[in-house]
Amino acid sequence: MKITIAKTAGFCMGVRRAVDMVLDASRSTQGPIYTYGPLIHNPQALEMLEEKGIPSISAIPEKAEGTILIRAHGVPPQEEKALEKAGFTVINATCPRVIRVQTIIRKYAEKGYAAIIIGDRDHPEVKGLLGYAPENGYTAASMEEFKALPEFSNAVIVAQTTQNTALYNDIKQWTQTHNPHYLIFDTICDSTEKRQAEVRTIAEKSDAIVVIGGKKSGNTRRLAQIAKETGKPWFHIEDITELDFEKLADAESVAVTAGASTPNWIINKTCRAIEEFFLKRKHFTSPFLFQTRDFLLKSNLLLALGAGCLTYTSFRLQGLDHNIIHAFIAMLYILSMQIINNIFSIKSDKYNNPGRALFYGRHRTLLTIISAACGGAGLFMAFFLNTISFYVLMVMSILGLSYNFKIIPGGISGDRIKRIKDIPGSKTILISAAWGIVTTILPGMNESVPVSLLPALIFCSGLVFARTAFFDILEIQGDKITGKETIPIIIGEKNSVRLIKEILILLFLTLLSAAGLGIIEQCGFLIALVPVVMLYTVHCSEKGNIRSNARLEFVIESHFVLAGILAMLC
């Protein structure tokens, strides 16, 4: 069974910008916040905003207060002025592509040109565009409607940014023959064009097509129309509960695409459900392997194993005799802290990783007991190892537990920062530091030579930093919704990807140079392959070659195990 996820599926630039603006406003402004009409055409995203106390209003009151955001589709200029007059602080979240069309219509309307908008008259974007040519604006949703329009001495033709490219091309060709004096502008968003072109391409190689997105979303409906035109089984769903799996049962390959307003968590949830359905229909080994991978990720056992492998790798790099107790201490500490953090992250995991959120919600009590048992067992081992290790691990455990609790006085930090986790960027930095201590500093406290310990520490902490920052990028939508300020949110996704790549290159060069100078063991040459492999994984994800989040998470977490395997081979 093959699932092909369109690279263009999910939030477009304009929708992402609008969602980011409303979430940023919720963190930075005082008083009530509203959106004027639905911000975007996706019921799950709108439900999320409602849960955050950001409702939409459809009528402009006489008097108002607070902040209101203009939807991504835009509104007529007179309505924007009315919102300001009512007393709102207005934030314009109109997509820049739509603003460009508004500007074209306004410019030529002032010169007396008629404005012909190719689009659905009842669509919010088209209603907003008509406001820029109030007395001389016309719409056409088909070739027949376009031909029925009167002839004008001067006219401009624009398209709704999410219009069907094939229809608009037909209209442009007809106009060049019959009304060559009309001015035609290419206003269909390039994201829309790519999205429509890609669904045609991936549909050719698949047995069925699933289109995810709001039923009121114009661009999603057009994707569904294109899927229908292929003649293959097709489905337009807003949520996985609407998918008729029995009608999908005979397909050997499925193409999945999504509208510009569809959040990542809905796409991931859908693909995961399709994958699970088909694996259950096959022979025993496939669902068993799927469930094993799923359990290793959700339970954090794979991550804990990775901590043990990194501890062993650190010993090998420094040429120390490995003590397996140190590996177990690292495994138990990481497992304990990660379970606790996941329990406290259920709210954001509802969007980032719905399966994990469900798992931790169902087994919260049991997982809390396991976390406490692992933490206690690690401390017990450290106590019998040496006193210093015990006290260091004790302090780290206390700090790890306090990470999610309100311990910072309000008078010092203000209202926004009450917990360590509220400090911008703290998550990735503190996780990397904690891993560096338990995998490198703590085990080598009595044996390591500082000159060899430093490269090993840089490698272990840097690899964890790259891994954690990468997952922060994947989870940026859910983190923004729940108010987390991770490194990708602070510096942006592109800068974060660049930072991860630079760190992985630095780790590669550090191991090569340290091994070459004899500072660490010669196994450093082989272990230097790990950051190279992770760099390649990041590159593949960036290019859209790995779209399944579960598969990607498994591959990334496995790099720590790979480090341990390479260390054993030396």
Image (cartoon, grey):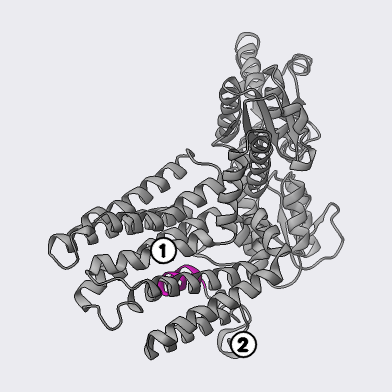
Residue labelled with disc 2: 410
Residue 285: image quadrant is top right
Task: Say if 350 sits above or below 227 in the image.
Answer: below
Mark 1, mark 2: which one is toward the viewer?
1
Residue at 41%, 46% in the rendered image: 537
Residue at 66%, 25% in the rendered image: 251
Tag 2: residue type?
Gly
Which quadrant would the N terminus be assigned to in this image? top right
Task: Say if 541 sits above or below 505 in the image.
Answer: above
Residue closest to the eye, 237 or 559: 559
Q: How many marks?
A: 2
Q: Name the residue at the top extreme.
A: 177
Answer left or right for 425 relative to 168: left
Q: Which mark is residue 337?
A: none
Spatial CA span between label 1 and label 2 = 31 Å
| Residues packed near mark 1 inside 10 Å, few (<14), some (14 to 19) or many (20 plus) | many
Residue labelled with disc 1: 464
Q: Name the residue at the left extreme.
A: 517
Residue 8: image quadrant is top right
Q: Earlier in the sequence, mark 1 or mark 2?
A: 2
Residue 568: image quadrant is bottom left
Question: Can see residue 488?
Answer: no
Instruction: Give the percent coordinates (x, y) of residue 280.
Output: 67, 38
Magenta residue span: 424-434
Magenta span dominant secondary structure: helix
